[in-house]
Image (spheres, rainbow, N blue to C red):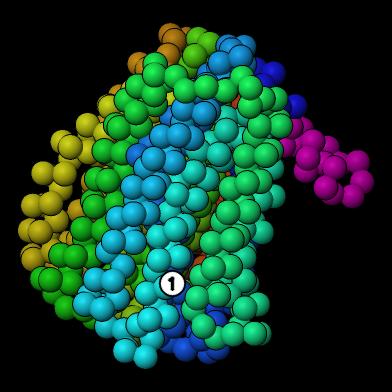
Amino acid sequence: MPASGGRFSNRLLAKNTAYNLAGQISPFIVAVVAVPFLIKGAGTERFGVLSMAWMVMGYFNLFDLGVGLATTKFVAEFIMLGKRRELGPLILTSLLILLGFGLCGGILAAALSPWLVHSVLNITPELQSEALVSFFLMAASVPIVILAAGARGILEADQRFGVINAIRIPAGSATFLAPLFVMLFSHSLVPMIAVLVLCRMTALVLYLIFGFRILEIRLKDMGFSRPYFRRLLSFGGWVTVGNLIAPLMGNMDRFFIGSILTLTAVTYYVTPFDTITKLFIIPIGLVSVLFPAFSAYSASGSDQLPKLHDTAIRYILLFMSPIVIVLVALARPIFDLWLGHEIAKHSAVILQILGAGILFSSVGRVPQNAIQAVGRPDLASKRFLIELPIYIPALLLATRAYGIVGAASVWTIRLAVDTTILFYLAHPLVGYREGVRHMSPTAVMLWSAMVPLAGYGISLLTLLEVRIGLTSLAVAILGLAGYRLMLRKNEREKLTQIIRRMLPGEKEFSYLNE
């Protein structure tokens, strides 16, 4: 049942989260297979330019200045409140703003292209003319990429993540497969980039067609609205502040390590960092589904908002905790097996420290999402403005004093503090009432701290067999504790029914609910 009916069932949200995870994982799997062939066929230099095209098409999503997220919020609210006749002006205003941003970004990218190709990047003279045309094509793709954020937001607002990922998976896979197809006829960068731009344009058109058709939006009902223009820019402006500061804080550690220590130290740090941050696809897949639901419930004053907020936190802890404890407890043998003894000796402890931060940050995405959805993106961004001047000197001092261990520790401490702040900001906004059962911020933070600490304790044991055995036991205990503490009675009953159907015979599992 679509969200337009005003109901966001747990089943619908779970299904849409699964769609999102598939949409993120599928292109990654395609990339793992395709990239070696692309490097071999195109050569390292051409592949470098191609990888920059991927970066541009991904990175410019941030330059919608929060209007894409604002579109999702307000469309979801209007659907919930039955204001369907106002959707046309809202959506057209949003798309025009995004088109303006896209054209400005594209013109800027085109103007910088000759300078980048001839002066900044170390591109051989034989490849420069080819690279310049490719950069111009990338510049032309900027408005397409930014418009797609708004077009996709229309579908997200109505919980049409099945449609979104039916478009996203082929489009994301084509990012790697289309250049491979072109290589059957040409090894030039120009047709490779041109096909990528065509794929993005196709995705944009499909998002618009399905969005307009599903929401029954007619062109004659659309028009520019100054009030919506101001609302979209006001909301999006604060989102943009957060979107600009968050990547800066997230990558500052690498900069300090590279400038204070050595590039080898960067490798020892970045390897576990890039490995464990891949886990963010789980909370990201969930919160992108939650945002339109939070927005709709907030607009209608529904008491479902605090219930959904609490459910999301419990489920993220339930799914992320076993993964984190395994990675923290077995970091050394995992790195030994994967990348060898030398990297494991330096990087395993970094993985363990960062693992705690990942769990804090994963949970923290829920209250941040809720704060934005209830119309206070300023609060979510202002906390960055407070944290930034404290984080930078702390990171600098810790890196100088303790190397990559100090950098990782400060990164994790910041995420723990940040998540605590988000919980206490979100708690009154979400509307928790006295007597309503929910996980308190204190309980969430204690759980998030104890899981990686338990994993670290297991990692100190000498015998690998004992560590593996205790890790398995810890995962089982976490599963049982999560079953009893994280799931409500009706959720446990549903899970018991699922287990009963999966196993042969008519077995009773009533002891699980005792």
Task: Point out residue 307 in the picture as x, y percentages from the top left corner.
Answer: 53, 21
The residue at the far right in this view is 505
Q: What percent of the width, then of the height, locates residue 226?
A: 39, 19
The location of residue 330, given as percent across then percent down, is: 44, 68
Question: In front here: 213 or 2?
Answer: 213
Range of the magenta residues?
490-513
**Principal SS element in the magenta part?**
helix
> Which image quarter: residue 456?
bottom left
Amino acid residing under circle 1: Ser
Residue marked by disc 1:
134
At x 22%, y 75%, the residue is: 120
| Left or right, residue 399 beside residue 228 | left
- The verdict on residue 497 being magenta is yes
Q: Is the C terminus in the top left, top right, bottom left or bottom right quadrant?
A: top right
- Mark 1 packing: few (<14 Cα in 10 Å), some, or many (20+)? many
Q: Is residue 388 left or right of residue 423?
A: left
**What residue is rendered at 11% in x and 44% in y?**
390
190 shown above or below 486: below
Looking at the rendered image, the quarter that the N terminus falls into is top right
Residue at the image position 42 percent from the left and 14 percent from the top: 431
Where, by quadrant of the figure, is residue 272 drawn? Answer: bottom left
The question of residue 135 being in magenta is answered with: no
Q: Is residue 165 above or below residue 191?
A: above
Q: In this rendering, would 85 be left or right of 269?
A: right
Asked whether residue 277 appears in the rendered view, the answer is no
Mark 1 lies on a secondary structure that is: helix
- Quick check: can you spot residue 186? yes
Residue shown at the point (17%, 68%) measured from the top left? 257
